[in-house]
Image (tube, rainbow, N blue to C red):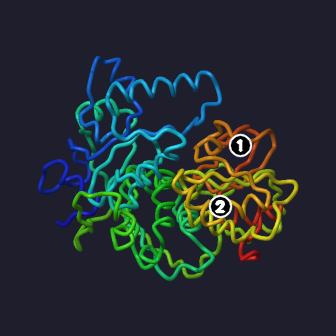
Amino acid sequence: MGMTIAEKILAEHAGADSVKPGQYIWCKVDATSGHRLGELEALGVDRVWDKDKVFMVDDHQAPPPTIAAANKVKEVRRLIKKYDITNFFEYGRGGILHQVFAENGMYAPGELIAQCDSHSTAGGVFNACVTNANLDAVHVLAFGELWFRVPESVRVVLNGTLPSWCVGKDVILKVASQLGTDFGLYKSVEYIGPVASQMTMAQRWTISNMGVEVGAKFALFEGDEKTDAFLEGRIDRPYQHVTSDPDASYSAEYEFDLSDLTPMVARPGDPGNGVPVESVRGEKVKIDQAFLGSCTNARLEDLEVAAKIVEGNSIHPDVRMLVSPSSQAVFGEALKAGFLETLVNAGALVEHSTCGPCYGGHLGILGDGETCISTSNRNFTGRMGSPLSHVWLASPATVAASALAGEIVDPREYL
């Protein structure tokens, strides 16, 4: 019996010829993040397993909005020096971890990465098994290994041709609305098919990022020339693309014909509440805030499409639009390309690269009764501030168009 992508990667890292779903194994990991260094120190461990394979970024409360947060940052700096961590990206030099780690060579096809953030599935866009290992992070830091129960694999086939006005965010909102937010629960979800090949790396990245929103352990794409183009100059180690065997076994397979896909939004409360944006046009959903940012949709092409939509126009006077590029590198590229100038001229506030607004920490939280349309990955009650606020999820194009209109609208009206 053949193996799926995840099974092949796990078997390789377990030193086994093959593995099967449900089997418990120990695997060597290729890299991890350093968010539990303080606990490692508390246990009396004075070194990490490999200081060059530990990546650390300060992104959630960056810069710190409180004294307590500032003291945490101070402590992180001390620990980074104590453990001689090579890859540390403080705010101003980094950005949001899922973007920054990729920009600095953390991921490559065939690798197994354990991080300390729920959206670590984002790394699956690089044909790698990347997952959240927050509870076991101290062990990973000390020994460079992690236990796994080999997950079942699910295949999602994306057929057709993606309409020019739709992107990866529309695809994953469609998939989650059809299959629910638990179809991938502790499973490895593989996205394949003509649309998967057609999409840009940024569009695929959105889907892998939101893998955890459908419960996935891993959210994988096959590697191709687009993968290689992104990695060129970022890594110097050899790698090979990993594909599933023709006779690999899947617990389920789902097919979507996306040729007639229209822009999607997710109603407040759950990322699975996806509906075509045209279906809510008559509801006249007024917005107070439009957020273009997060680890999900704040890459260069996301900023570009938003800039094209708002160019020569003004953000609605009742709306505040916040823009936060996914990394300082992306910020610089968007600055040179003029995208940020266009957004600022339209009335948007461009913030630095941070997780702040997305998880309700600072730099854009919502008040009672306010409504936000956001490119982020979660719209749970209270996610961006007040539990009495409302968050809708959408693509960058839909967010930008809605910011101009003052209500949720179909971006095709502005493209």
Q: Residue 135 vs residue 239: left or right?
A: right
Helix, strand or loop at disc 1? loop
Q: Which residue is mark 2?
A: 394
Residue pictured at 58% horizontal, 55% vertical: 331
Against 70, is 244 above or below?
Answer: below
Residue occupying the point 55% across, 61% down: 333
Within 10 Å of the Cα at label 2, are there few (<14), some (14-19), or many (20+) other Cα atoms?
Answer: many
- Disc on the earlier residue, 1 or 2: 1
Q: Badge 1: how crowded within 10 Å, few (<14), some, or many (20+)?
A: many
Q: Which residue position is annotated with label 1?
A: 364
Real-space Cα distance between discs 1 and 2? 17 Å
Element at badge 2?
strand
x and y percentages locating residue 245 in the rendered image: 22, 70
Name the residue located 34 percent from the left edge and 65 percent from the top edge: 232
Residue 355: where, in percent of width, then height?
A: 58, 43
Asked which quadrant contains residue 310, the reply is: bottom right
Asked whether, in this view, residue 134 is left or right of residue 9, the answer is: right
Q: Amino acid at mark 2?
A: Ala
